[in-house]
Image (cartoon, grey):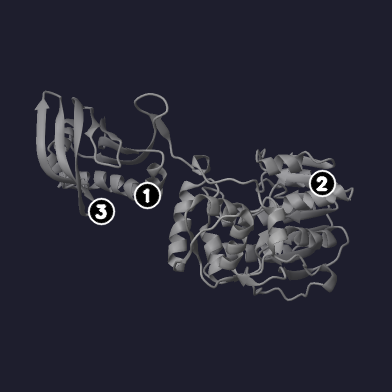
Amino acid sequence: MRVAITGGTGLVGGHLAAALAEAGHEVVIVSRGVDQRPWAKEISALSGVRVVRAAISDEPALAAAFEGCDAVAHCAGINREIGTQTYQVIHVDGTASVVRAAEQAGVERLAFLSFLRARPDCGSRYHESKWQAEEIVRASDLDWTVLKPGMIFGRGDHMLDHLSHALRTFPVYIGVGNRRVRPLAVADMVQVLMASLVEGRLSRQTVAVLGPTEMPFDEAARLVAQVVGVERPFLRAPIAFHYLLARVAERVMTVPLVAIGQVRILEEGVVEPTLAPDPLPADLTPRTRFVADSVRAGLPEPGRFGLSDLRLPRRSRRRGPGTGRVDVCGEGTAVIRRPPAVILEFVLDVEQYRRADHKIGRLKRMHRAGNAGLVRHGGRFMGLPAPSVTLGFELTPYSRIDFTGKSMPWPLRGFSGFFTCAETPEGTLVVHRECFQLGRLLGPLFAALLGNWLARDTAAEVLRMKAILEA
């Protein structure tokens, strides 16, 4: 038979594709792009596997990919939101597109991979979006199966991959306390999917799938540490700490050490299913225990987290190659009913301008020679005193001021900024941009923690400037 798989280069989809191909079935992997990860390349190169490019929102392309297929395994999903890739777009709208495309293409059977504790009105968009997707599948005309697994482990997974890399990278392990899990081997998950897709079992059923070993998540991490051969102190931290860690990791890592949705999953434990009324047959009940041998079989190649794992903002260069920096910037615009010359001279009157720019402290020194000069002033950071900075400035009369950092406190490596003025019928259009420059290590952390604050403050600075000048 021919089976299409969305998310076919992910953990479950990839193992399912390999199992189907080995059993002699045709496999169509549906992917929105070319996945360059080694695991994805390995799956895509298997005999009997064909990759079709189609976004999960592109219903006609999905219908074309499903043409001639007997079944569809809908395994595509995300555990964090990035830009337009939101839970609504991927889990809800994407599932609706997959269901409609499968119906148009004449597909008979669909198996949907949800989550163990997916449910409505629980305050978690991850859980709620997975539940909405379940409801879409159950309302379809297809011969459907909804599978609700817990935490899945195996080769190519997130759990063993990130745990082993974290244990090799960081000097301590900070745990989540007595949050319990029942790790599910990916091979056992694939067995259930194969029964549904190939044998037609579990028709119109919603089934929970859990591993046989129940333990605190921190004990699972200790077992991984033992298998990889590292000794680390194990500490506990409140769940609020892990939410903060996840927020930072989502902003600075290409694949986060932990995502906010995953912290929510761990917070409530992964042992009790919700709204999964149908029992799993005894012969399909998972039997792979979470022990040293099964952990060892799923571990990735030894490695640590490094710079390649960071999602760096825009980079520039200073003092030659090899000394990269990260720019964290904010920008604001406003139309001010005052002439450009008045606006620019107001900016250079530091004692007055600090009323608009709440990052400027007490003026210490200013030297101006014509249209250029230096200014040194104290800093303010979120209302608190900060070290002094020295800036150079250059005025282009009636149109622009440029600022450059001359002496910056640690950890700043530099500063650049400008104001531009353009006359319009409504007034002077003012654009203000400022960029703080940091090193590659601290820059992503600064961007994650303070980037949004800087963006809001710079925009507000221009509006405060407008209010003062127009008063």
268 relative to 352 in the view: left or right: right
- Badge 1, how many Cα within 10 Å: few under 14, some, many 20+? few
Closer to viewer: mark 3 or mark 1: 3
171 relative to 58 in the view: left or right: left
Q: What residue lies at 15% left-to-right and 41% top-to-bottom? A: 377
Dot 3 corresponds to which residue? Answer: 382
For marks 2 and 3, the one nearer the N-term is: 2
Q: What residue lies at 11% left-to-right and 23% top-to-bottom? A: 370
**Residue 338 visible in the displayed image:** yes
Measuring from the top left, give residue 373's x and y in whole percent: 14, 27
Q: Residue type at mark 2?
A: Val
Measuring from the top left, give residue 141's x and y in whole percent: 79, 62
| Above-or-below relation of 44 to 257 | above
Q: Residue type at mark 3?
A: Met
Q: Residue type at mark 1?
A: Asn
Q: Tell which of 313 and 55 is nearer to you.
A: 313
Dot 1 corresponds to which residue? Answer: 452
For marks 3 and 1, the one nearer the N-term is: 3
Dot 2 corresponds to which residue? Answer: 27
| Above-or-below relation of 116 to 376 | below
- Label 3, label 1: how many angstroms apart (C-alpha)? 13 Å
Secondary element under disc 1, as helix, strand or loop, is: helix
